[in-house]
Amino acid sequence: MTLGLIGCGKMASALVKGVLLAGVCQPGEVWASDCFFEAAEKLGRETGIQAVRTNAEVAGACETVLLCVKPQDVAPVLQELRPVLAGKLVVSIAAGVSLAALESAAGAGVPGVRIVRVMPNTPALVHKGASAYAVGGSATPKDGETVERLFGAVGVTAQVKEPLLDAVTGLSGSGPAYAFLMIEALADGGVLMGLPRELSLKLAAQTLAGAAEMVLSTGEHPGKLKDAVASPGGTTIAGLEALEVCGVRAGLIRAVRSAAERSREMGKA
C-alpha cells in the first residue's frame, strides 16, 4: 500500500511511525507534505519516508491519502487535489468535518474517490490510541480494512455509523484530558497527605494505567473489579463514598455528554 500524509503534525507523525513499525508500509511507500516543508523534511529524516513540497505530489503518488490538516483547511485542500483524486481513498481525521462536507469538497464528479472519516485520540502517540471511523457512500469493505490496519497500528479501532462519531469525540476523543485531570487530582491528594510530588504523580499515573489494563485484559465489568477492592468498612469504600458525595461519576458522564454535544454543534457549523 502507498500512503500519503497531508499534514505532518503530532497525530500524523504518530500514525506513520506506528504503521512503519507494524510493517503495514515500508518507508519508500509513504509520502508526506506539509504547509511548512520543514515539518515534512523532519519527519522524513526520522522515518525514511519521502518528503515533498506539494500536496498534489502526495495524492498523485499514493493509493491512500491521509488528511491531517485543521478542519478549516480541509475544503481548500480537497478542492486543490480534485485533479489527482480519481480512484483514491481519502481518510480524514479533521474533527467535526462531516462525510457529506468531505465528499462535496473532494468533488462529486471525481470518479472512484472514496471517503472515510476517523476520530482518533492523542494516546496514539504512545501506540495506545482509541479510534473510531465511519465510511462514506462510495467506500468499500476493503477501504474499511485499510483504515483498521492503519489505525490498528497505534491502538484499537472500530467502525461506527457517522452520527455516533460525536459520542466517540466526547468519550475517547476528549477522554484523555479527563484522565489527565484525574491523574493530576490524585497526585495532589497524595501530596496533601505527605507524599513527594514526583512519587505521587508516578503512583497516580501508574494506578490509572494499571486499572485500565485490568479492565481490558480480564474482560470483567469495572463495577465488579471495583467491588473486589472495596472491603467492608475499609479504606476504599470510604474513598468511594467521598467520590459519590462530590458527584465524580455524574461529572464524568456530563463531561462526555457536553463534549459530544459540542462536537455536534461544530459539525453543523
Image (cartoon, grey):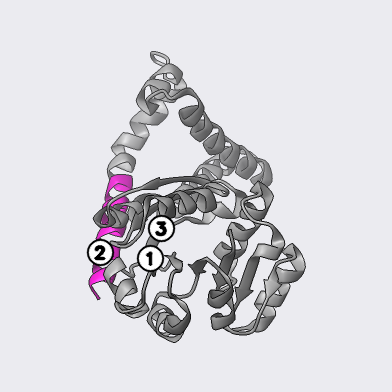
- Pair 3/2: label in front: 3
- Looking at the rendered structure, the kind of residue marked 2 is Arg
- Looking at the rendered structure, the kind of residue marked 3 is Met
Q: Secondary structure at mark 3?
A: strand
- Looking at the rendered structure, the kind of residue marked 1 is Arg
Q: Position of residue 115 (x, y in %)?
A: 37, 65
Q: For label 3, count other residues whose C-alpha is less than 10 Å away and answer few (under 14), some (14-19) or many (20+).
A: many
Task: Using the image as rendered, state which of residue 162 and residue 263 is in the foreground.
Answer: 162
Residue 264 tag number: 2
Task: Using the image as rendered, state which of residue 198 and residue 43 is in the foreground.
Answer: 43
Q: For label 1, count other residues whose C-alpha is less than 10 Å away and answer few (under 14), some (14-19) or many (20+).
A: many
Cα distance between the residues tagged 1 and 3 = 17 Å
Relative placement, left or right, of 79 versus 58 is left
At a point 66% along the width and 49% down the height, the residue shown is: 23
Q: For label 2, count other residues whose C-alpha is less than 10 Å away and answer few (under 14), some (14-19) or many (20+).
A: some
Relative vertical location of residue 239 with respect to residue 163 in this rendering, above or below: above
The residue at which mark 1 appears reads as 114
Q: Secondary structure at mark 1?
A: strand
Q: Earlier in the sequence, mark 1 or mark 2?
A: 1
